[in-house]
């Protein structure tokens, strides 16, 4: 066909695009590639000499995607399909090993990652023994990085791009081994179930044939039933044993005793990077992703290295948003697979919603949305972080946060109503701008529809007034109360709990919100509490006026106290300066008396009484210099 001609004869992007369309068509109809002739065409066009010479990773990736639609090969050396699949597997191994990569070009390695991932997927689809092929790939990477076994002790360094490719392949092979083990387990269970059904059908057909023989064979029928039940018990026991074996393989074999476990110490050392030896971003991203994939396999391995993973997340450079985004996505997978182990670290996942990178925040919110809607993580205690996303600068983050709250509002247990007190408490402690807080609460309070919820929420908000530490927090609470739907019980609650919020009525914003509640209540013709409304309005006006007077008086007293304190400070300062000047004068006069010239001693003796008399006068307060500030 035209597509096969273009895929085999075209060059560059056109060749890769044609192969991509063929792989997409194979997804709808595997017969397009699942034959010896088509596989030969696929081998020549997608994995042949052209792909190797030009390092055309896009074409190789598309060919590997198409091969994933082919059934697993049966070992038959005489079969043409088996022979061509064996050749294809060799080329896929070369792709996975990165034999055609350019170590001097980082972009070439970045393009290789997708091709290697699909090549490994194709190997686990078509190969009759993918675990052996995987070992061949890992050993090939080891030889390419460190050399042969003889050269290994002498090589103390490795190329960062080669090491990056090796870690990527290591993590992906570990994950595919887990999937392959589960596929084999499912095949065994299906085979055992089919075998049991077949025996049951043969036994039931035998009973129908012997039904005309009378009561003489009732004993033998009962014995057959007992035998079937015993066999069913054996089948159930065998199935349980299979599940235990698979669990042991995934928990202890793949990353504990298998080929992958030989390289995990080196992987952990690179990820930790305690001495800062590894500075390549590609290497750190590849190693961290490989660690996350290994952690998805074993519960004990995951629990042991979760602190290291969060340490990497905390220490990641600000400009390496790819690393942080990858770790967040991996944490979502880990939380889905091992929720109990990840649960203590949930607040650290929520903290990523405040990351400087828009991409990291978006990925974090996406992960948390899936986990919350699937009941895999707890919302209470951290929901404030999601509420802040309603005012994020990125529109997609705002829309995703709104979507999450809309989905939560559809649940029967009213999660938003239960979370609102926690949200109000945490948001009020963050010193947000008033308009930000109120826009968030206006959106969330719109989900409170039931009258009983409005009544209970109003009571909870009023009870929080004495716990507020600033008038702004009280104003925010009053705003939330003003957004609720008011009924008779709400008015009664406002009257009964008046003493809790009366001290805040001096504030114009607080009073305005409570007056808004009154105005809405008066417009509601269903309310039968006209007297209660008038009483509440009178109390609001009275305590608001009294509160304003008290505030003004306290402000005036504070200003007067401040002025008096300033006057006293100035007076004390001047007195101290006067004493220092007098002391300095006395000291200078004493020095004149003690160290005068010997020739003028008689004259000094005559002057001494006058100096002493002057010092006595200055000490007694009869100084000729007026004191400053006494009359001021």
Image: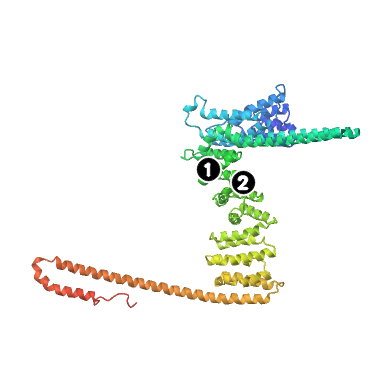
Q: Is residue 238 above or below residue 378?
A: above
Residue wearing tag 2: 339
Say whether marks 1 and 2 touch (CB < 8 Å). no
Q: Is residue 107 visible?
A: yes
Residue drawn at point x = 68 percent, y = 76 percent? 530
Q: How many marks?
A: 2
Mark 2 neighbour density, 10 Å: few (under 14) some (14–19) many (20 or more):
some
Circle on res. 308: 1
Alpha carbon distance from label 1 to label 2: 18 Å
Q: Nearer the viewer, residue 282 or 487?
A: 487
Q: Is residue 491 above or below residue 84?
A: below
Residue 341 lies, in percent from the top left, at 59, 45
Q: Residue 541 lies in what quarter of the image?
A: bottom right
Residue 292 image offset from top left, x and y in percent: 58, 40
Q: Is residue 534 above or below residue 213?
A: below
Observer able to see residue 179: no
Q: Nearer the viewer, residue 17 or 179?
A: 179
Judge the density around disc 1: few (<14), some (14-19), many (≥20) Cα neighbours within 10 Å.
Answer: some
22 or 603, nearer to the observer: 603
């Amino acid at each position: 066909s035209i597509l096969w001609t273009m895929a085999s004869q075209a060059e560059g992007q056109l060749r890769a695009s044609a192969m991509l369309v063929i792989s997409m068509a194979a997804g709808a109809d595997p017969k397009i590639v699942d034959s010896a002739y088509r596989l030969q065409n696929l081998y020549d066009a997608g994995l042949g000499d052209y792909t190797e010479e030009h390092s055309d990773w896009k074409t190789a990736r598309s060919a590997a995607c198409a091969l994933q639609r082919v059934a697993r090969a049966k070992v038959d050396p005489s079969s043409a399909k088996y022979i061509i699949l064996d050749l294809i597997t060799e080329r896929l191994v070369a792709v996975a090993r990165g034999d055609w990569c350019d170590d001097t070009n980082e972009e070439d390695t970045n393009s290789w990652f997708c091709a290697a991932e699909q090549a490994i997927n194709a190997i686990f689809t078509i190969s009759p023994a993918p675990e052996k092929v995987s070992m061949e790939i890992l050993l090939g990477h080891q030889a390419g990085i460190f050399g042969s076994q003889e050269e290994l002790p002498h090589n103390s360094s490795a190329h960062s791009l080669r090491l990056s490719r090796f870690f990527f392949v290591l993590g992906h092979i570990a994950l595919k081994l887990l999937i392959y083990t589960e596929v084999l387990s499912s095949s065994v269970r299906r085979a055992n179930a089919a075998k049991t059904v077949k025996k049951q059908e043969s036994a039931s057909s035998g009973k129908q044939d012997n039904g005309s023989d009378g009561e003489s064979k009732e004993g033998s029928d009962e014995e057959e039933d007992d035998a079937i039940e015993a066999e069913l018990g054996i089948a159930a026991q065998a199935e349980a044993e299979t599940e235990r074996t698979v669990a042991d393989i995934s928990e202890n074999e793949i990353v504990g005793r298998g080929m992958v476990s030989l390289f995990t110490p080196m992987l952990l050392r690179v990820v930790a990077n305690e001495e800062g030896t590894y500075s390549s971003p590609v290497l750190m991203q590849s190693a961290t992703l490989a660690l996350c994939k290994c952690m998805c396999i074993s519960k004990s391995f995951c629990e042991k290295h979760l602190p290291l993973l969060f340490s990497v997340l905390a220490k990641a450079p600000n400009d390496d948003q790819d690393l942080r985004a990858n770790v967040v996505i991996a944490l979502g997978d880990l939380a889905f697979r091992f929720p109990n182990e990840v649960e203590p670290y949930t607040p650290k996942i929520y903290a990523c919603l405040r990351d400087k990178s828009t991409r990291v925040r978006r990925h974090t919110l996406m992960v948390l949305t899936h986990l919350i809607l699937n009941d895999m993580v707890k919302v209470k205690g951290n929901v404030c972080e999601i509420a802040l996303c309603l005012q994020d600068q990125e529109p997609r983050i705002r829309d995703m946060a709104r979507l999450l709250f809309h989905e939560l509002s559809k649940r029967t247990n009213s999660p938003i109503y239960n979370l609102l007190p926690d949200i109000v408490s945490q948001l009020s402690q963050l010193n947000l701008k008033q308009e930000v807080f109120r826009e968030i609460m206006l959106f969330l309070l719109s989900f409170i529809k039931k009258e009983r919820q409005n009544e209970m929420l109003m009571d909870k908000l009023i009870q929080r007034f004495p716990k507020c530490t600033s008038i702004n927090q009280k104003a925010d609470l009053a705003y939330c109360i003003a957004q609720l739907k008011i009924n008779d019980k709400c008015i009664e609650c406002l009257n009964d709990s008046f003493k809790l919020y009366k001290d805040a009525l001096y504030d114009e914003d607080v009073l305005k919100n409570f007056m808004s509640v009154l105005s809405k209540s008066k417009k509601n013709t269903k309310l039968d509490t006209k007297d209660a409304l008038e009483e509440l309005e009178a109390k609001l006006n009275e305590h608001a006026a009294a509160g304003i007077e008290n505030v003004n008086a306290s402000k005036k007293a504070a200003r007067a106290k401040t002025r008096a304190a300033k006057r006293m400070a100035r007076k004390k300062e001047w007195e101290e300066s006067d004493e220092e000047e007098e002391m300095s004068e006395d000291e200078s006069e004493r020095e004149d008396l003690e160290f005068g010239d010997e020739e003028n001693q008689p004259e000094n003796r005559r002057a001494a009484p006058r100096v002493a008399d002057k010092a006595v006068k200055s000490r007694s307060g009869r100084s000729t210099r007026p004191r400053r500030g006494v009359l001021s």
